[in-house]
Image: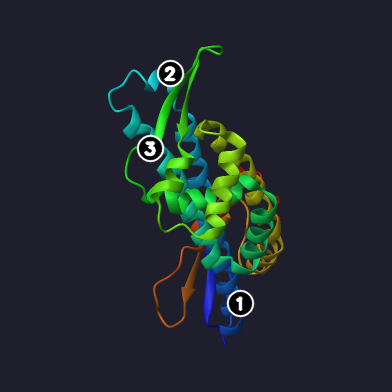
Amino acid sequence: MSFAKCFTFNIGKGPTLYKELNERDYNVFSTALSTIEMAELEMYYAELLRTGYHILSSISPDELQKTKDKFYIAEYNFASWLNCFQIWRAFHEKNYKEIFNPLAHSFYDNYNEYKLACVLRTTFTHMPCGPLSFVFDVLQETSSINLNISNILKTDKDLKRKEIYILEETLNKYGERFDILKFSAEANKVFESFQSEIWSKMTPGVNKSFKIIGKHMPLNGSDCYNSYIEFENGSEEINVGHIVNSFIKKSQLYCLGFIL
C-alpha cells in the first residue's frame, strides 16, 4: 500500500510520478534525508569557525593602533573567534559525539594549539577588559597584539590545575609576548585539519544516505531540485529536492568527496 509518492515537477509538463513509497520505505528515506540535513548544518558550523578566524586575521595591529577603540576591537574579535570555536565544539559534541569525541581527545593530547584554545575559551572570554597590549618591534618595525598570560594566572581564581599547567607552559615558551594573531593562525591550521578528519569520518554515512535517497528520487539537475514528497493522508508535502540540492551545492563548495 502506498504511503507517500515522490513527484518531479517540470514547467509545461506538470508533476510526474517518480516513485511510490510504502511506510517502511518512507521511514528509511526520511532517516537518510535527516542525515543529509544534519550534514549540511554541520558545514554551517565549519563555516562559522572559519569566518571567526578570517575576521580576526584581517586585523592589522599597525592600523588598529591609530584608532581610539583599538583595545576593544582587538579583544572583541579575539573573544568572538574563541566563542566560534566553542560553538563549533558544542555542536559536534551534541550531534556527532561518536565521531567528534575520539578526535577531540587525540587533538587535545597532540596539538598544543587546540589545547590552549580550549583553555583560553574558558579564561579570556570571562575576564575583565584589559588582558591585551600592543607592542611595537623596533627591529621589525611592526606591531603585535599580545595576550598577558601572567595576568590571567594572577587574576583568574577559578583556574583548574590542568589549565594552570597549560598557561604556565605557554608563558615559559613565549614569555610576555604571546602574539594572538600568530597563535590564531597556527590554531586555525589545526582546526582545519580537525574539520577534515570529521568530514572524512562523516563520508560513509552521507554516501549511504545518498544511495538510499537516490532509490526514491532523482539526484541531478532540475529533476532533483523540483522533487517533492506527497502523502496519501493529505499531510503537507515536503520539498525534498530543495533539501538535497542545497546540500549538494554546499558539499561541492567545500570539494567534499561524497558519492552523489
Q: Which mark is residue 205?
A: none
What amino acid is at disc 1? Val
The earlier-in-sequence mark between 2 and 1 is 1
Label 2, secondary structure: give it.
helix
Residue holding disc 1: 28
Query: Where 70 sits versus 140, above or below?
Result: below
Q: Is residue 53 visible?
A: yes
Q: CA distance from mark 2 to mark 3?
A: 16 Å
Residue most extreme to the bottom = 1
Between circles 3 and 1, the one closer to the viewer is 3
Residue holding disc 3: 75
What amino acid is at disc 2? Asp
Q: CA distance from mark 2 to mark 1?
A: 57 Å
Q: Which residue lies at the image location 56% right of the left edge and 46% below the top edge?
A: 168
Residue most extreme to the left = 68
Q: Which residue lies at the image location 69% right of the left edge and 58% below the top edge?
A: 106
Label total for image: 3
Q: Position of residue 191 (x, y in %)?
A: 60, 46
